[in-house]
Amino acid sequence: ESCALRSYLNGDFLNGFDDNQKRAIAEVKNSNPDNPEHGAPGGNGTTDKVFCLSIEEANKCFSSDADRIAKYGGKSSLWWLRSPGHSAEYAAYGTDDGDVDQWGFYVDNAYQGVRPAVWVKL
Protein backbone atom coordinates (compact mmCIF):
# COMPACT_ATOMS: atom_id res chain seq x y z
CA GLU A 1 0.00 0.00 0.00
CA SER A 2 2.96 2.35 0.46
CA CYS A 3 4.75 1.35 -2.76
CA ALA A 4 6.34 4.15 -4.81
CA LEU A 5 5.07 2.52 -8.01
CA ARG A 6 1.49 2.57 -6.73
CA SER A 7 1.86 6.28 -5.88
CA TYR A 8 3.25 7.01 -9.34
CA LEU A 9 0.49 5.09 -11.15
CA ASN A 10 -2.28 6.90 -9.26
CA GLY A 11 -0.51 10.28 -9.46
CA ASP A 12 1.67 11.32 -12.39
CA PHE A 13 0.66 8.42 -14.64
CA LEU A 14 -3.09 8.90 -14.06
CA ASN A 15 -2.72 12.66 -14.54
CA GLY A 16 -1.45 11.98 -18.05
CA PHE A 17 -5.02 11.11 -19.08
CA ASP A 18 -7.43 13.87 -20.12
CA ASP A 19 -10.46 14.67 -17.95
CA ASN A 20 -12.89 12.52 -20.00
CA GLN A 21 -10.55 9.53 -19.83
CA LYS A 22 -10.04 9.99 -16.08
CA ARG A 23 -13.82 10.02 -15.52
CA ALA A 24 -14.10 6.71 -17.40
CA ILE A 25 -11.54 4.97 -15.18
CA ALA A 26 -13.28 3.28 -12.25
CA GLU A 27 -11.93 3.40 -8.72
CA VAL A 28 -11.64 -0.18 -7.46
CA LYS A 29 -10.91 -1.91 -4.19
CA ASN A 30 -8.04 -4.34 -4.66
CA SER A 31 -7.32 -7.13 -2.25
CA ASN A 32 -3.68 -8.02 -1.81
CA PRO A 33 -3.63 -11.73 -0.99
CA ASP A 34 -0.64 -13.57 0.38
CA ASN A 35 1.67 -15.27 -2.11
CA PRO A 36 -0.13 -18.57 -2.82
CA GLU A 37 3.07 -20.59 -3.27
CA HIS A 38 5.39 -19.11 -0.64
CA GLY A 39 2.96 -17.55 1.87
CA ALA A 40 4.55 -14.07 1.99
CA PRO A 41 1.94 -11.62 3.32
CA GLY A 42 0.20 -9.48 0.73
CA GLY A 43 -0.75 -6.59 2.96
CA ASN A 44 -3.79 -4.38 3.31
CA GLY A 45 -6.32 -3.84 0.56
CA THR A 46 -6.06 -0.65 -1.47
CA THR A 47 -8.40 1.57 -3.45
CA ASP A 48 -6.93 2.63 -6.77
CA LYS A 49 -7.75 3.74 -10.27
CA VAL A 50 -4.51 2.39 -11.78
CA PHE A 51 -2.81 -0.72 -10.42
CA CYS A 52 -0.58 -3.67 -11.18
CA LEU A 53 -2.30 -7.04 -11.46
CA SER A 54 -2.03 -9.64 -8.70
CA ILE A 55 -0.77 -13.18 -9.34
CA GLU A 56 -4.36 -14.41 -9.47
CA GLU A 57 -5.48 -11.63 -11.84
CA ALA A 58 -2.53 -12.17 -14.18
CA ASN A 59 -3.48 -15.84 -14.45
CA LYS A 60 -7.20 -15.10 -14.84
CA CYS A 61 -7.11 -12.13 -17.23
CA PHE A 62 -4.98 -13.82 -19.89
CA SER A 63 -6.06 -17.06 -21.54
CA SER A 64 -2.54 -18.31 -22.25
CA ASP A 65 1.14 -17.68 -21.63
CA ALA A 66 1.39 -16.22 -25.14
CA ASP A 67 -1.30 -13.65 -24.31
CA ARG A 68 0.50 -12.76 -21.08
CA ILE A 69 3.75 -11.77 -22.86
CA ALA A 70 4.36 -8.02 -22.65
CA LYS A 71 6.35 -6.36 -25.42
CA TYR A 72 8.43 -3.22 -25.28
CA GLY A 73 10.37 -2.05 -28.32
CA GLY A 74 9.44 -5.28 -30.09
CA LYS A 75 11.05 -7.45 -27.38
CA SER A 76 9.42 -9.49 -24.63
CA SER A 77 9.64 -7.75 -21.29
CA LEU A 78 9.32 -8.66 -17.62
CA TRP A 79 6.55 -6.80 -15.77
CA TRP A 80 5.73 -6.25 -12.11
CA LEU A 81 2.75 -7.69 -10.30
CA ARG A 82 1.45 -6.24 -7.02
CA SER A 83 1.68 -9.60 -5.23
CA PRO A 84 4.62 -10.32 -2.98
CA GLY A 85 7.28 -12.77 -4.07
CA HIS A 86 8.76 -15.35 -1.70
CA SER A 87 9.32 -12.64 0.94
CA ALA A 88 8.29 -9.05 1.62
CA GLU A 89 11.36 -7.65 -0.17
CA TYR A 90 10.42 -9.40 -3.41
CA ALA A 91 7.51 -8.90 -5.82
CA ALA A 92 6.06 -11.43 -8.24
CA TYR A 93 6.27 -10.64 -11.95
CA GLY A 94 5.22 -11.69 -15.43
CA THR A 95 8.10 -13.32 -17.29
CA ASP A 96 9.27 -12.66 -20.83
CA ASP A 97 7.84 -16.05 -21.90
CA GLY A 98 4.39 -15.36 -20.42
CA ASP A 99 4.68 -17.27 -17.15
CA VAL A 100 3.94 -15.80 -13.71
CA ASP A 101 6.97 -16.02 -11.44
CA GLN A 102 5.81 -16.28 -7.84
CA TRP A 103 9.36 -16.31 -6.40
CA GLY A 104 9.80 -12.74 -7.62
CA PHE A 105 12.57 -10.19 -7.97
CA TYR A 106 13.93 -7.82 -5.36
CA VAL A 107 11.69 -4.73 -5.46
CA ASP A 108 14.58 -2.38 -6.28
CA ASN A 109 15.20 -4.19 -9.59
CA ALA A 110 15.08 -1.45 -12.23
CA TYR A 111 14.93 -3.84 -15.19
CA GLN A 112 11.26 -4.75 -14.83
CA GLY A 113 8.55 -3.16 -16.91
CA VAL A 114 5.15 -1.99 -15.73
CA ARG A 115 1.88 -3.08 -17.27
CA PRO A 116 -0.71 -0.78 -15.68
CA ALA A 117 -4.28 -2.03 -15.38
CA VAL A 118 -7.54 -0.10 -15.11
CA TRP A 119 -11.23 -0.89 -15.07
CA VAL A 120 -13.22 1.31 -17.43
CA LYS A 121 -16.81 2.42 -16.76
CA LEU A 122 -18.98 1.70 -19.81
Image (cartoon, rainbow, N blue to C red):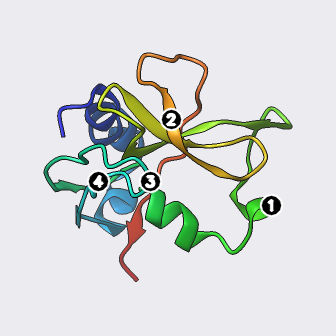
Q: Residues within 10 Å of mark 1 (few under 14, many from 20)?
A: few
Residue bearing the label numbered 1:
66
Q: Quadrant of residue 101?
A: top right
Q: Residue drawn at (68%, 52%), measured in percent from left and top? A: 99
Residue bearing the label numbered 4:
34
Is disc 3 placed on a helix, strand or loop?
loop
Decide: marks 1, 2 in contact (CB < 8 A)? Answer: no
Q: Is residue 51 left or right of residue 64?
A: left
Is disc 4 placed on a helix, strand or loop?
loop
Q: Residues within 10 Å of mark 4 (few under 14, many from 20)?
A: some
Q: Residue drawn at (53%, 61%), measured in percent from left and top? A: 58
Q: Relative to 57, say whether 90 is above or below.
A: above
Q: Residue furthest bottom?
A: 122
Q: Residues within 10 Å of mark 3 (few under 14, many from 20)?
A: few
Residue 105 position, x and y percent, is: 51, 27
* Quarter of the figure with the N terminus: top left
The span from disc 1 to disc 3 (Cα, nearest Å) is: 22 Å
Q: Residue drawn at (69%, 75%), measured in percent from left and top? A: 63
The span from disc 1 to disc 2 (Cα, nearest Å) is: 20 Å
Q: Which mark is residue 104?
A: 2
Q: Of the residues tagged 1 and 3, which is closer to the observer?
A: 3
Q: Earlier in the sequence, mark 1 or mark 2?
A: 1
Residue bearing the label numbered 3:
37
